[in-house]
Image (cartoon, coloured by chain):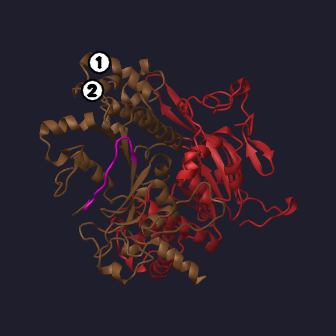
Amino acid sequence: MTPAHTEANVPPPLVRVEQVVKHFPISAGMFGHAIVHAVDGVSLTIKAGETLGLVGESGCGKSTLGRVIVRLQPATSGHVYFRDIDLTRLHGEKLRRTRQQMQMIFQDPYASLNPRMAVGDIIAEPLRNFGIARGRRAEAQVQEVMRVCGLNPNFINRYPHEFSGGQRQRIGIARALVLNPTFIVADEPVSALDVSIQAQIVNLMEDLQDQFNLTFLFIAHDLSVVHHMSDRIAVMYLGKIVEVGPSDDVRDGPLHPYTKVLQSSVPIPDPDLEAGRRPILLTGEIPSPVNPPSGCRFHTRCPIAQPICSEKEPPLERKLDGRLAACHFPGKL
Amino acid sequence: MTAVDGVSFEVDRGETVGIVGESGSGKTMTALSILRLVPEPGRITAGRILFGEKDVVHMTDEEIREFRGADVAMIFQDPMTSLNPVLKVGFQVEEAMAAHNRFTRGQAHDRVIPMLQRVRIPDAPARVRDYPHQFSGGMRQRAMIAMGLSNEPSLLIADEPTTALDVTVQASIIELLRDLNREMGAAVILITHNMSVIASLCQRVIVMYAGRIVEEGPTRAIFKNPEHPYTWSLLRSIPRVDERTHEKLVSISGLPPDLSNPPPGCRFHPRCRYRVDRCFTDEPDLIDVGASQRARCWVLMRNVLAESKTDR
């Protein structure tokens, strides 16, 4: 999808995340407080028009990172640039204006829609918030975006409970789309849906991307869906990005051992292939983000860990053309 | 409402059978029926459930109590709701055995640690004294499996056992079920919405849609040559991690039907892209379509695919 280009005319990224840290203080029993290191120094770029997939398991910080990028939550430190504007420095009206171009789609289509609002009002709310359209003009825009998202525009006065899970996710997408954004963060948009409905939403998102030239950050735990949707994949483990690269490369030749483990754990719907495949099983539990391990955070569970891995943290750096990994022994598992 | 409608199947000793379907397809109700655990006000209105020679539907209370847990064990999606939060894990495994007559109290006590080791709970001698909240999600599911298998049942029913778990943990639970099936010889009925998990674990598949079996057969046959359009679409609606070219997913339009008012004819016809006139009015029987493969369809995918070939 992205045209081949030489180093010289690489367009600047649409979104640039630099050393973003998000810590949550928690009260820890009788003695003072502890800190959850949800996101711990993440840098990423997202090119205009591409889909960057962000994959990782529960608790790795991928949703928090998504929310920090669109500033639903402030970063503890670091910067998020959107078209070279530092979002972490923006306040008030300027932030609002910039935000108009970035929207979010949420996982749970039941919890993310106000049950007391009619669908038309839910989708029109961003238009009113930003003073773009009201009344009949808003209604026309809402009906148009409903049609684009595969919803019957005549259902504008119905309430969320009258819709199925898949249709509700379409409502969530319509609400994100109505402002004509350039960048959308989709946080596990299909994982709460039935299998036959997931394909409808995945296809819809792909169509919308082509139609409106959208840039996606697609967050999910399922490597198969992320690979299908994304041009590039970033893999996250315990608050850190451990690998970034083009989708096929990351799948076919993972550089980080954790990526390899993830790839081997995803079953393939083919009994013949499955008969010859065995997952690489991890020992132990995912460590607590309150007290992350020293050195490489994966060293406590890594099948190929060496002494250096617990002593020195490997930086996320270029290992091959267009591919980054944070590992002392990339590609060795 | 008829949640499960005329479902018949057999599970052989030691066999692994997958029941696949979406929410509302009746897969869980089918499994609960086997244990006569259908929640009120639901009930089994017709049919038989034979375990060996015994009919579960007509068992006395005493018989059904012994049958559940000793002959057949069930594990659920969310292990936390099945474990008692205020009792130690080891004690709960022991209780599962004490509730039945296979083992004496002393034997039951001695079997706890080996059972936990058997389900690969690391450091089992220490962890028997832990409470469920001290276990991770994957470890809780292992503890549930240990409880389920502690009486050496001949059938284990696992209802979406990996759905709430991360993929790496899911992989380890599937491996565990595979190993235990081999080591202990217990048959496994795996209920899931995930076709890939079935491909990984099961010898045979039953595909359910709207309370009916729409297709069943050996896993290999079903995955290579699905004959029902629902099975065919389901297999093409999920992205494969090994896909080589980016193809659009096959989406199944519409929604599963309301079971209090199922559509006439084939229950899948409102969503089927290959339907013919007959599908609107007559419901097909489950017919033989290959070596122990059966499908409930007037059209069959082999005819659809042959036709699309001649069109080209």
Q: x, y (%) of residue A124?
A: 46, 71
Mark 2 or 1, nearer chain start? 2
Q: In this view, does A299 lie to the left or right of B85?
A: right
Magenta span: chief secondary structure: loop
Quadrant of res A96: bottom right
- State the mark number for residue A279: none
Q: Name the residue under label 2.
A: B97
Q: Which chain does red denote in the image?
A: A
Q: Is mark 1 on a helix, strand or loop?
A: helix
Query: The N terminus of chain B appears in which quarter of the rendering?
Result: bottom left
Give the farthest residue toward the right. Answer: A8
Query: Which span is picked out in magenta?
Result: B4-16
Q: Nearer the viewer, residue A168 or B58?
A: B58
What residue sits 40% from the left and 73% below the top? B271
Q: Is residue A73 visible?
A: no
Give the residue type at disc 2: Met
Q: Which of B131 and A118 is in front in this view?
A: B131
Nearest to the observer: residue A123 or residue A191: A191
The colour one sees for chain B in the rendered image is brown
The residue pinned by badge 1 equals B107
Tell me where residue A228 appears, x and y as whole percent.
Answer: 61, 59
